[in-house]
Image (cartoon, rainbow, N blue to C red):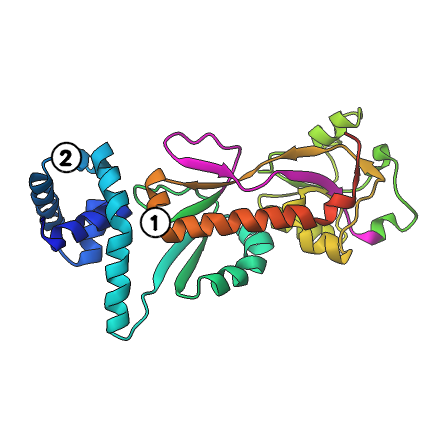
Amino acid sequence: MPPFRAIAVFYQVARLNSIAQAAEQLSVTPSAVSQQIKALEERIGTTLVARNGRNIRLTEAGERYFELISDKIEGVMRATELMRGTRQVANLVIRTTPTISTKWLLPRLGRFLQAMPETNIRIDGSNEPVDFNRDNVDLEIRHGLGGWPGLYTEPLVEERFLPVCAPQLVRGGLLDPAAVLNLPMIRSVKAQVQWSAWTEAQALPPPPGNSTLSFDRSHMAVDAATLGLGVALESELMMEAELRSGQLVMPVARTPKLELATQWLVCPRSNLRRHRVMRLIEWLREEAAQWRADSPANSIDFLN
């Protein structure tokens, strides 16, 4: 039987998809990790880890071996911590944009902490996409339209984009769609849906270029609309609380159904082997489904 030390080293390499990170985790040198992997491969009689320069990947045999040993290794780790009288705490690093973390993730995070109390979570709020070869991030909620080669991607949820403003801007009653363009326009410059898409769906001329307020963060555009500075076209995902409380309302009776996914769960496929990452993904799926069922925008009368 191969030495348990070599098996445990392989487990860390497979879990982290990195010899360097495994070495850091085990407080040994990368060379020592490579030697243990080589010894294990010689003992088993097959290649488990394929190397391409500084990058590695598990072979088909390596994937199968990791699948077979994971529960056993994790059971040994839990038993060891139990005998030591301590609890094993998992670390989880999530990268999200400031908008999605503030407007959607943070209000729900308490439920995840209740379900996974032995987890330390770090939220890395940034609009910069993760370089998973460099950054120590378990899962990213990435803004965009998907299609990132070499990565696991899954849409968080389909979002509907709505025109919204503070109630005081429509005290005289709901507006004709053309009259909306007479209000000061608030724009999110990085949003996937812009005012031109809304006017086109309404068979209206393009929105005027004057009297506009532009932001590079959607949560700032939502806050500006809440303050009565104009009318914004934003995702229901980013303004759930404001719609529910009545701080934001639609200035028109009906609006085109502009729907697409702009928030994606992204990580290397190797990260899916980590129990804590899969538990987080499963929780996000559950929360997104519940949000969709309870969204205040469900009562809106869409044109299509």
Is residue 185 shown to the viewer in this render?
no
Residue 210: image x %, image y %?
A: 74, 35
The amino acid sitting under disc 1 is Arg
Which stretch is magenta? 142-167
- What residue is drawn where x is 33% and y is 45%? 273
Q: Residue furthest right?
A: 172
Residue 184: image x %, image y %?
A: 77, 42
Q: Give me the disc on residue 274.
A: 1
Q: Residues within 10 Å of mark 2 (few under 14, many from 20)?
A: some
Q: Secondary structure at mark 2?
A: loop
Q: Secondary structure at mark 1?
A: loop
Q: CA distance from mark 1 to mark 2?
A: 22 Å
- 51 left or right, relative to 287: left
Of the pair 187 and 126, the residue shown nearer to us: 126
Residue 233 vs 197, above or below: the answer is below
- What residue is drawn where x is 24% and y is 48%? 69
Q: How many callouts does the rendering have?
A: 2
Residue 248 vs 64, above or below: the answer is below
Magenta-span inclusion, residue 143:
yes
Q: Residues within 10 Å of mark 1 (few under 14, many from 20)?
A: some
